[in-house]
Amino acid sequence: MKVTVVGTGYVGLVTGACLSEMGNHVLCLDLDADKIKTLNEGGIPIHEPGLLEVVRNNVAAGRLQFTTDVERAVSHGTIQFIAVGTPPDEDGSADLKYVLAAARAIGRTMTDFKVIVDKSTVPVGTGDKVQAAVADEIAKRGIKLDFAVCSNPEFLKEGAAVKDFMSPDRVVVGADDERAILLMRALYSPFTRNRDRMMVMDIKSAEFTKYAANAMLATRISFMNELSRLAEVMGADIELVRQGIGSDPRIGTHFLYAGAGYGGSCFPKDVKALAKTSADAGLPSKMLEAVEAVNDEQKLVLVNKVVAKYGEDLSGRTFALWGLAFKPNTDDMREAPSRVIIEELNRRGARIQAYDPVAMHEASRVMPASAQLAYASGASAALEGADALIIVTEWKEFRTPDFDGIRDALKDKRVFDGRNLYEPALIRAMGLEYHCIGRP
Ligand code: UDX
């Protein structure tokens, strides 16, 4: 099939690349000429396992192309995905200006039937706004053209995006137009071959499903983070509690890890947006406000542990910091706990020597130039001359480190671990003082 994807961010690029992998002819549109140039030359602007290969192979096969030409992009696909950003407004609600601009561009340019698919995470009711924007542009041209709007939220996780897209748990499609449903079914059937994983519902429920999923997952994390603080005070071990409750199938084992707080492009933004939607509807959400507040506090938990040991004045101190990205297998720094931690430690006078396997380039782009932050060439280089080590992201290469090397390099032989990577008894036996999350 012929597919156009508007927006080559995380979701747009993965969607376009994976659809071309199944034989579709995909044209991706972005207004950022530099990005399009990189993509057409076979490069990708983000770190995402497996994505580069899929992009390269399909560009080489002629099934995947990138353009800045709106007219060419709109005329290409019968299915037009809108996968542009929905950044939070000042009040936390999702800003729809890019989504509606894309809808208007399609309405202004299209000449035949199109299925216009919202893939961006958008508030309930956006489908109607997209419908109205496209219809308005067509009416301005004084012509009549047929189109259908549908919602198809994306549930992929960064770091596992290609895998998640290629074998989804479910594909949610919100649509009330039979042609749109048939085309979406045809498009996704190769991805859901073993059993039908496509769920068709009304547009509003589909839009709502995405927020509900992310809000539920964020709630689990904040709940566990809050429990981890209580566990510390009570002398219980949150890791054992996690295993104890996770074995109940009603609870399940995933997404129960206490840590340094959730970050990324989705949870923080979507929790805020759903809270704003609830408030606007006259049903302010006590739950979501608490989820966000607990997470803001959790990003400071490691800083509080450092301050409890060293006092408020950290001038003259140097801390090694392992992991900058908001989670492993990505270079994404959006809402990363490391940003808050570095800022707070710098504010108290400390210097940071950081190492991340892939996110240092992105970090140097987003961190303020005034930050007292040096980048080390490797995990052990980051330890040189440092008082203590702080672990923020659970990259695999940090899981079984050279404990002797850590002990010998650190002045205070002290580790603050925001991801509970090590057995406390083991690391203590190696001569290190260990501070982790919710464990005695
Ligand atoms: C999330 C959703 O999982 C995905 O379905 C949606 O499409 C986009 O948002 P993503 O932001 O890529 O995906 O990352 P995810 O793996 O969900 O992790 C989000 C954050 O939660 C990370 O900061 C992670 O460190 C944190 N987390 C996750 C925990 O603190 N504990 C856990 O148990 C799981």
Image (cartoon, rainbow, N blue to C red):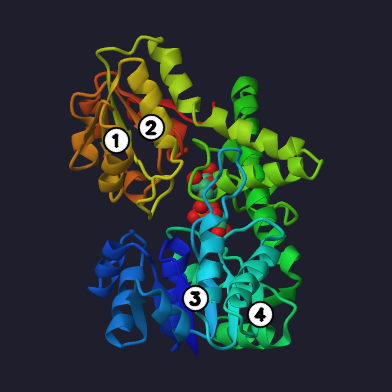
Neighbours of disc 3 within 10 Å: few (<14), some (14-19), many (20+): some
Q: Secondary structure at mark 3?
A: helix
- Rendering coords of residue 289 (x, y %): 68, 35
Q: Earlier in the sequence, mark 2 or mark 1?
A: 1
Neighbours of disc 1 within 10 Å: few (<14), some (14-19), many (20+): some
Mark 2 lies on residue: 427
Q: Nearer the viewer, mark 1 or mark 4?
A: 4
Query: Contact, CB < 8 Å: mark 2 with mark 1?
Result: yes
Q: Which residue: 57% across, 34% down?
A: 295
Mark 1 lies on residue: 403
Horizontal side of residue 180 vs 104, given as left or right: right
Q: Earlier in the sequence, mark 3 or mark 4?
A: 4
- Rendering coords of residue 272 (x, y %): 62, 42
Amino acid of disc 2: Ile
Mark 3 lies on residue: 166
Mark 4 lies on residue: 148
Q: Earlier in the sequence, mark 1 or mark 4?
A: 4
Q: Is residue 170 visible?
A: no
The circle drawn on residue 142 is none
Q: Nearer the viewer, mark 3 or mark 2?
A: 3
Horizontal side of residue 157 vs 38, given as left or right: right
* Mark 2 C-beta to ligand 1 under 8 Å: no
